[in-house]
Amino acid sequence: MFRRIFNDQNKPDYILLGVIFSLLIIGVVMVYSASYVWSDYKFDDAFFYVKRQLLFAGAGLVAMLVIMVIPYNTWKKYANLILLVCFILLFLVLIPGIGMVRGGAQSWIGVGAFSIQPSEFMKLGLIIFLSAYLATNQKYITSFKKGFFPSMILVFTAFGLIMLQPDLGTGAVLVLTCMLMIFTAGARMTHFLGLAALGLAGFVFLIASAPYRISRITAFLNPWEDPLGDGFQIIQSLYAIGPGGLMGVGFGQGLQKYFYLPEPQTDFIFAILGEEFGFIGGTIVIGLFLLLLWRGIRISLEAPDLFGRFLALGIVAMLTIQTMMNISVVIGLIPVTGITLPFLSYGGSSLTLTLCSVGILLNISYYSKI
């Protein structure tokens, strides 16, 4: 099967493969640098987090290589089943005793010594289902009743279940990705404008209904008003990026990981990268993500059928939106959302599902004329 994939006539996008491996290597190196202080203090093992990250990366790479040789149209056949399983997992995580609470969110299900995050599965599952739905029903997407409304009901049902955990960051990535797919399919702008008005009202309600979200907004607007409380993370993140300058302070020489920036190996790993490798290091990483975006768009445009086009678009949109949100939080452009940086942040479900997603994207590239 691998021989069929790697031949002179048809082959996966090697540039995209190179970008993925480059980001993975940078991620493993930065997880070690960002976590060894906290890891040694908490577990008496400076390599605790990086060893687990290597395990996640290895499992994810195996999954990516397997998925890469599965014809992407296979996922269309099982789109309904995949979405059903994702919804079941989202319901299960809300049940006390099954769902695990971390950082105030009941978003994980324990599986032995590890845990899975159902919302990560839902992002990919909904992209697959929506791609199949739009490919079959694109002619109805301009109709509010037959196309637009059923699509958005499904999206916001998944969003509502994710918000019950609550996990606004993941929910926002899911909604924005799906809305971009539906818009690209040809939905009318007037429908989106009406949805935007309802969405704004709902967003205000979500913010007002949870005091910690209001605190995040006020901390974003003026973090110095509460520098030891709600503004602490963003201030410490900026303290990390600022001293990095052009070249950075050097690998492993950053100071913010010494218990200033909480859990720096996860959501704020880009801040540690900026501190240790400076503007140049940050620019290289952003450049790799832009290269991933470019190759993903090309794969989508050259895919041989509508399902492949929507699927490739959804995957690259999900990764790009998540990347933009994470980096925007780190540099203080938007409030803290608790979203990871794809390929770089520590985390099992996020990294593994990201690699599975790009495995599908690589398979689509095999059939695309790029």
Image (cartoon, rainbow, N blue to C red):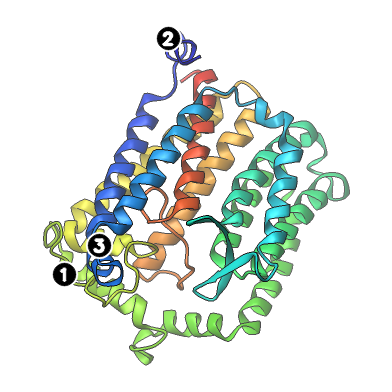
What residue do we see at 30% from left, 53% from top?
50
Q: Is residue 161 above or below residue 13?
A: below
Which of 180 and 170 lies nearest the eye of the viewer? Answer: 170
* Amino acid type, residue under disc 3 in the picture: Asp
Q: Of callouts 1 and 2, which one flags the residue occurring earlier in the amino acid sequence?
A: 2
Judge by depth and name the residue closer to the eye, 53 or 261.
53
Residue at image coords 54%, 19%? 367
Disc 1 residue crowd, few under 14, some 14–19, many 20+, Cα 10 Å: some
C-alpha span from label 3 to label 2: 45 Å
Secondary structure under badge 3?
loop
Distance between mark 1 and mark 2 Cα atoms: 48 Å
- Of badges 1 and 2, the one in the foreground is 2
Disc on res. 7: 2
Give the vertical position of 314 relative to 325 (above or below): above
Identify residue type, mark 2: Asn
> Within 10 Å of the Cα at label 3, are there few (<14), some (14-19), or many (20+) other Cα atoms?
few
Q: Earlier in the sequence, mark 3 or mark 2?
A: 2
Question: Are the residues flagged by discs 3 and 2 in contact, CB closer than 8 Å?
Answer: no
- What residue appears at the point 57 percent right and 38 percent down from the top-left corner? 313
Reading the image, the residue beneath label 1 is 243
Q: Earlier in the sequence, mark 1 or mark 3?
A: 3
Horizontal and vertical percent for residue 38?
27, 69
Asked if residue 193 shows in the view, the reply is no
Mark 1 and mark 3 residues within 8 Å of each other at the beta carbon: no
Instruction: Please tell me whether mark 2 sits on a helix, a strand or a loop.
Output: loop
Q: Is residue 140 left or right of residue 127?
A: right
In-image side of 322 versus 313 (left or right): left
**Residue density around tag 2, few if under 14, some if 14–19, many if 20 or more, within 10 Å:** few
Q: Is residue 357 left or right of residue 73?
A: left
**Marks 1 and 3, how far apart at CA:** 28 Å
Q: Which residue is mark 3?
A: 45
Amino acid type at circle 1 is Pro
